[in-house]
Image: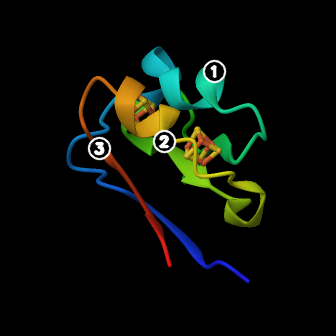
Amino acid sequence: MKKIKINIDYSKCITPENCRACINICQPVVFVLTFTDEDYHDPKNWKIVPIFPILCIGCNLCVENCPEKAINVLIK
Ligand code: SF4
Ligand code: SF4
């Protein structure tokens, strides 16, 4: 079975709630947008998380469409 690792560079993905390109392009719904703190009004607390990497089909569309080049998909 293939192993898929999806990394997001959070130093590049700074305002995911305004972007969402990876969420919108990923058909199997690997990513979710969530917040990491109680204050969800603060954009710094929002994060894209590849919560279901097992669903990834390795299409690479998220990598190609991320405007910040923040996503890396590694398939072994
Ligand atoms: S490579 Fe394709 S399936 Fe995998 S996370 Fe990216 S967009 Fe989704
Ligand atoms: S496409 Fe890139 S910059 Fe946009 S939310 Fe996803 S990881 Fe962040």
Residue pictured at 68% horizontal, 43% vertical? 32
- Mark 2–mark 3 Cα distance, whole angstroms, equals 13 Å
The kind of residue tagged 3 is Ala
Residue pictured at 39% horizontal, 39% vertical? 63
Which image quarter holds the N terminus? bottom right
Mark 3 element type: loop
* Residue bearing mark 1: 24
Q: Earlier in the sequence, mark 2 or mark 3?
A: 2
The kind of residue tagged 2 is Asn
From the Cβ of disc 3, is ligand 2 less than 8 Å away?
yes
Q: Position of residue 53 (x, y in %)?
A: 67, 62
Residue pictured at 25% horizontal, 37% vertical? 69
Task: Return the mark for residue 70.
Answer: 3
> Few, some or many C-alpha atoms within 10 Å of disc 3 (few <14, some 14-19, many ≥20)?
some
Q: Earlier in the sequence, mark 1 or mark 3?
A: 1
> Which image quadrant shows ligand 1?
top right
